[in-house]
Amino acid sequence: MNDIPVDNTKTFLITGAAGFIGYYLSKRLLEQGSRVIGIDNINDYYDVNLKHDRLNQLKLFSRFEFRRVDISYKDLIIKVFEDYKPNIVVNLAAQAGVRYSIENPDMYIQSNIVGFFNILEACRNHPVDHLVYASSSSVYGSNKKVPFEESDVVDQPESLYAATKKSNELMAHTYSHLYKIPVTGLRFFTVYGPMGRPDMAYYGFTQKYFAGESIKIFNNGDFKNDLYRDFTYVDDIVEGIERVLSIAPTETVSHKVFNIGNNSPEKLMVFIDTLEKCLSRATGRKVIFNKIFEPIKLGDVPVTYASTDLLQHAVGFKPRTSIEEGLQKFADWYVEYYDAK
């Protein structure tokens, strides 16, 4: 697999730089000598200490600059574009989480709709070489056809979060068409890894185990018709983004959308069993979760399964990390970071 080099003469603006994927992407670009401007509002959706720890790692690089900015404030976003004149923008700032969107819908409209509109407006008024933004596998809803392909109809979202991400794709298409902005949307599929998001199931399960609590599994205890997830290791995700950055859409097709997933869905229970084994190796003792089975939650979908053929054809990339390898890296990091032995 030949690398597609990133142009280090470009200035990259990464929104959500203190977030999980934003941190890893910023770090990868900085390691290659790029100039990275990171912005984040560092909200308290999950532990802000983790966000600060990520930022502190990025601040070790001299070519990294950080602004604490909320993308829902248009004047502040415009000021960042005026000050730094970014060539390439990666919008990863968003209010994440399917279940949380049912409890706090306002957060999703402000960040995911208003915030993304502000990014598009900034790119319109301060032209960029390429805008890449985070969409989500959630846009596929309860699509019965698998694997999910970018050509599938995605008009029936199962959650407000999914609806905001579908809205982002429509907004991006319109701005790209009207103002000739080269834009690429990436539909992420269940990203995991060290320094990840504590609201994600694998991370939450681990926290509950060390707190002596039971974990809740929302599949009714149905092992035959278990939930399937296309778990994708963060390094694979970042490599995919990095490759996409260098290939902006053309004027004839100025907005493209790609799936970026593992193309190999796993049963949720297999994933949990693997996590137990990885934590056992990391701690040196047998780890078994105390499991409570409950019905699937409102807004959740039974299967996520990405076809990654388009991405592979466009940039020669296909994820490679197995769940055994990825979860072991997470388990080793977690035990060390939290001194959990």
Image (tube, grey):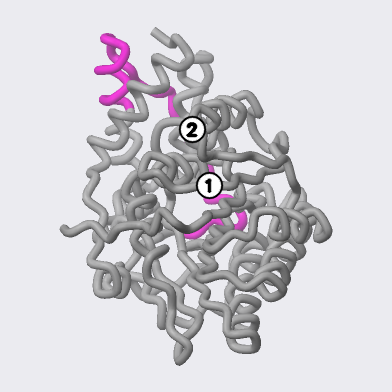
Q: Which residue is mark 2?
A: 61
Q: Position of residue 153 (x, y in %)?
A: 48, 82
Residue 5, by quadrant, is bottom left
- Residue at horizontal 43 percent and vertical 50 percent from the top: 190
**Left or right of 163, for residue 144:** left
Left/right placement of residue 25 relative to residue 277 reads: right
Residue most toward the front? 9
CA gap between label 1 and label 2 equals 9 Å
292 on left or right of 261: right
Magenta region: which residues? 276-301
Locate residue 326: give its quadrant. Answer: top left
Callout 1 secondary element:
strand
Residue 9 circle label:
none
Q: Is 326 in the magenta?
A: no
**Residue 279 within the segment the image draws in magenta:** yes
Residue positioned 50% across, 23% down in the render: 207
The residue drawn where x is 27% and y is 61% is 4
Q: Tell whether label 2 touches label 1 (CB within 8 Å).
A: yes
Secondary structure, mark 2, is loop
Packing grade of label 2 (10 A; few <14, some 14-19, many >=20) is: some
Q: Is residue 246 above or below residue 176?
A: above
120 is higher (above) or lower (below) than 234: below
104 shown above or below 139: above
Q: Which residue is depicted at the point 31% across and 29% down? A: 329
